[in-house]
Image: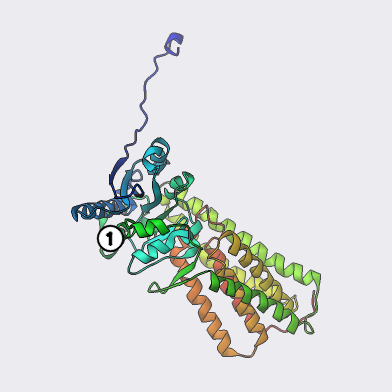
């Protein structure tokens, strides 16, 4: 009809995608699928994103096949295309539901080769399978709600899924410098080992029969070598201890407290304002960095400056705020904010609540024993050990899907530092 109007239209073909699929049948009708996208971002060689994942998955699949052992749970592998344009595994899941009819779990590999592999996206419920399979488990439970990758397509099809990724060198992400020379040889070897062990683990009938979403655990690394993991009982005890600590603090300090609604409101409003500011700046920085062509250096510099200047500004802001509010009222109000956040995290993001609840316990201990210098330094060291490793995964936590940006946690250390100072008790506002 356009030609009938006198125009001479050109036919422009859109980009087509090709997904590569194969499988090793098992003795049962169940399958586990491994996915890695093989396309790369325009103008980026894609060594870490995602050639390393493809090479490691292919090598593991070939090795598994050459051993000649028939697995009890079948192994499916998918090398998906069009990931960088929003298609990837999603198109495969949409067009081939028949191939996934008996798939009980999906593992997606993306951006590996620059550091330890971290489970994200549903990681809290299914990470135990990963931890059982690998010899040196790594991860942070906070990453369960990080920026979603291709695992989300399988999850939407009611297939439990998680991604195994690493992103410790974001300056090489989606840029021409993502080349082999910038990979970590040890990490590449580790990636192959992890995939091989996972294939061995998930191909066992015992695992498939017992497989279900487990109760979320809290897990994190200390100094990248010590891995801490604990389950629901310890999580509940920490929540209970935080509640008891705050209530006990209020009861024991009730005679010293000069309760003022204005003082409480000012304290809470000040902290909430900072949290909103941190969240907004963090997500905004993420959007600028990942949605701007060529990742201009000024964006990275701006992000680093914000990471330094915001905590510094917050410190002086809180210090000034505390001078106009009776000290105990100020401290207890802040502890109440974090207790509320921690209990909300326990429900909405189970496994991450320790980041809010531990400051409550430490603030209570500091106010109950104000002259104990050992407690002050021990508590400060504990917070540092717990929170500083989060800088290692800052880019993940800055993801659009994460409601708790990384800079949010810097505030915990600042608040504890402010509360650890012996401010003169002023009249309640």
424 sits to left or right of 236: right
* Closest to the observer, 385 or 158: 158
Number of callouts? 1
Which quadrant does the N terminus fall into?
top left
Name above or below for residue 96 compared with residue 248: above
74 up-or-down from 195: above or below: above
Residue 425 in view: no
- The residue at the point 67 percent across, 63 percent down is 272
Q: Front-most of 107 and 297?
A: 107
Task: Provide residue 191's location: percent of width, then percent of height.
Answer: 30, 60
- Find residue 419 and report its horizontal and vertical position in percent: 64, 79
Mark 1 burial class by Cα count in 10 Å: few <14, some 14-19, many 20+: many
Quarter of the picture containing the C terminus is bottom right
Q: Name the element at disc 1.
A: helix
Q: In terms of depth relative to the viewer, which is nearer, 277 or 135?
A: 135
User: Which residue, given by chain and number where applicable, does mark 1 sit on?
Assistant: 188
Give x and y (percent) for residue 415. 61, 74
- Residue appearing at x 52%, y 67% in the figure: 308
Tell me, yes or no, if residue 27 can be seen here: yes
């Amino acid at each position: 009809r356009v030609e009938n109007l006198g125009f001479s239209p050109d036919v422009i073909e859109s980009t087509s995608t090709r997904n590569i699929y194969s499988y090793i049948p098992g003795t049962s009708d169940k399958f586990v699928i491994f996915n890695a996208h093989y396309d790369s971002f325009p103008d980026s060689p894609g060594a870490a994103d995602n050639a390393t994942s493809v090479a490691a998955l292919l090598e593991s699949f070939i090795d598994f096949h050459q051993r000649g052992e028939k697995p009890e749970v079948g192994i499916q592998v998918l090398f998906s295309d069009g990931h960088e344009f929003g298609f990837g595994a999603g198109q495969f899941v949409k067009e081939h539901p028949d191939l996934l009819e008996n798939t009980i779990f999906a593992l997606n590999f993306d951006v590996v080769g620059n550091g330890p592999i971290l489970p994200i996206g549903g990681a809290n419920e299914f990470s135990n399978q990963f931890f059982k399979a690998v010899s040196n488990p790594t991860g942070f439970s906070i990453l369960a709600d990080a920026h979603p990758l291709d695992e989300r397509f399988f999850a939407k099809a009611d297939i439990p899924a998680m991604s195994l990724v690493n992103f410790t060198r974001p300056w090489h992400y989606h840029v021409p410098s993502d080349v082999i020379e910038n990979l970590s040889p040890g990490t590449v070897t580790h990636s192959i080992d992890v995939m091989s062990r996972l294939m061995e683990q998930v191909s066992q009938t015992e695992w498939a029969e017992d497989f279900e979403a487990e109760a979320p655990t809290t897990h994190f690394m200390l100094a990248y070598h010590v891995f801490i993991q604990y389950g629901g009982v310890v999580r509940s005890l920490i929540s209970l201890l935080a509640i008891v600590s705050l209530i006990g603090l209020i009861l024991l300090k009730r005679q010293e407290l000069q309760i003022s609604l204005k003082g409480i409101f000012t304290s809470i409003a000040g902290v909430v304002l900072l949290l909103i500011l941190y969240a907004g700046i963090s997500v905004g920085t993420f959007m600028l960095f990942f949605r701007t062509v060529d990742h201009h250096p000024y964006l990275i510099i701006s992000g680093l400056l914000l990471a330094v200047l915001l905590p510094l500004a917050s410190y002086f802001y809180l210090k000034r705020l505390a001078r106009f509010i009776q000290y105990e009222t100020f401290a207890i109000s802040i502890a109440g904010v974090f207790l509320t956040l921690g209990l909300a995290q326990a429900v909405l993001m189970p496994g991450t609540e320790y980041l809010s609840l531990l400051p409550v316990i430490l603030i209570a201990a500091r106010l109950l024993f104000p002259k104990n210098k050992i407690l002050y330094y021990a508590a400060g060291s504990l917070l540092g050990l717990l929170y500083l490793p989060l800088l290692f995964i800052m880019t993940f936590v800055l993801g659009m899907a994460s409601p708790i940006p990384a800079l949010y946690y810097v505030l915990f250390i600042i608040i504890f530092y402010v509360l650890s100072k012996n401010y003169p008790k002023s009249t309640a506002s």
